[in-house]
Image (tube, rainbow, N blue to C red):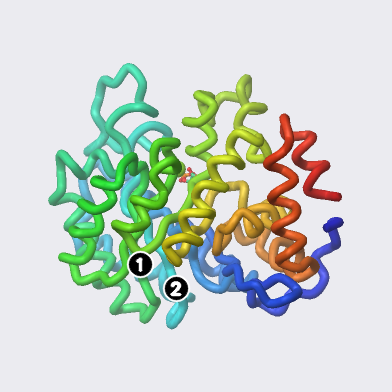
Amino acid sequence: ATASGPVNWDGVGTTSDGHRVKVLGNVGSPADAQAAAAAGAEGVGLFRTEFCYLDAAEEPTVDEQRAAYAAVLAPFAGKPVIVRTLDAGADKPLPFLSPEHEPNPALGVRGLRVAFDRPEVLDRQLEAIAGAAADSGAEVSVMAPMVATAAEAAWFAGRVRAAGIERAGVMIEIPAAALSAKEILDAVDFVSVGTNDLAQYTFAADRQLGAVAKLNDPWQPGLLRLLKLIGVAAEITGKPAGVCGEAAADPALARVLTGLGLTSLSMNAAAIKAVGAALAAVTYEQCRAAASAVLETADPAEARRAAAN
Ligand code: PEP
Ligand code: MG
């Protein structure tokens, strides 16, 4: 499976022999959403909702949130959009929500953990998302960040359904969640792998620290072996498992992820055409072979070479 340039892509993610892998956009603002739609995204695999909160001294009202989300959803009427609930804490601190003194914020009360203490904040966000879905006509599902266990996933899915939203999923960003992917998929409708955080927690290497950036290379075989577990869980349960971290934006790695059993790839707008074209240039069997080959390697350089053969 040698690399080929971003030539032919007709806007529907498939391998050359028709194995379907949705090619989706990551968005965090109305401008991002327009760029993703213009690049040919089939939908949105990660809508980061923090933009609506970042400069806010207090929680935006349900109506304010609803209008802000509807503006992002607008270009995707009739298309699938996965909205991520608030991922406050660690690298995304929020004045009105994040705990003030945590010795290790990346290991503290962040993501869904905030909602265990303040479920009413989550419920108001879900109400706003349901309203924005109705306003825009997008096919909205919702997922939670920073989920560690199947019990947390089940708790979240219950609140999503109580808000009248049909499809609930969770991100896999914590190694324990990757190791429990099957049990988590039993509790929700889909998962999406956040490889940025999953790498950070797997290698115990701060994603914001240049000095340890080599460990956070998405071609690290130790990370790819965790992704394999998630792909197998998707195959066993028949439920979707996407990737929405930076790893999905690398065309050669996109083939490997497809071969590992992941079912959709979500990325920044600039990467969409190259990834779509890279998938269209190989068969599913070639993706499977590339995936098997990287799992036998010892370091990222060897993994990159193995995938290119
Ligand atoms: C990730 O962790 O890979 C991810 C997609 O979420 P974020 O980068 O917003 O933490
Ligand atoms: Mg993350």
279 in relation to 268, above or below: below
In front: 32, or 144? 144
75 in relation to 101, above or below: below
In the rendered image, residue 135, in percent from the top left (x then y), is placed at 30, 78
The answer to whether residue 52 is visible is no
Drawn side of residue 216 relative to residue 144, left or right: right
Q: What residue did someone put label 2 on?
A: 80
For image coordinates 71% across by 79% down, the residue present is: 10
Q: Label 2: how many residues lie within 10 Å, few (<14), some (14-19) or many (20+)? A: some
Which image quarter holds the N terminus? bottom right
Q: Looking at the image, how many numbered discs can be counted on the residues?
A: 2
Tell me the amino acid under the disc marked 1.
Ser
In the rendered image, residue 16, in percent from the top left (x then y), is placed at 75, 74
Disc 2 + disc 1, Cβ < 8 Å: yes
Drawn side of residue 85 relative to residue 253, left or right: left
Q: Label 1: how many residues lie within 10 Å, few (<14), some (14-19) or many (20+)? A: many
**What label sits on residue 141 in the rendered view?**
1
Tell me the amino acid under the disc marked 2.
Pro
The answer to whether residue 207 is visible is yes
Q: SS of the residue at dot 2?
A: strand
Q: Residue furthest top?
A: 103
For image coordinates 24% across by 65% down, the residue present is: 128
In the rendered image, residue 27, in percent from the top left (x then y), is placed at 49, 59
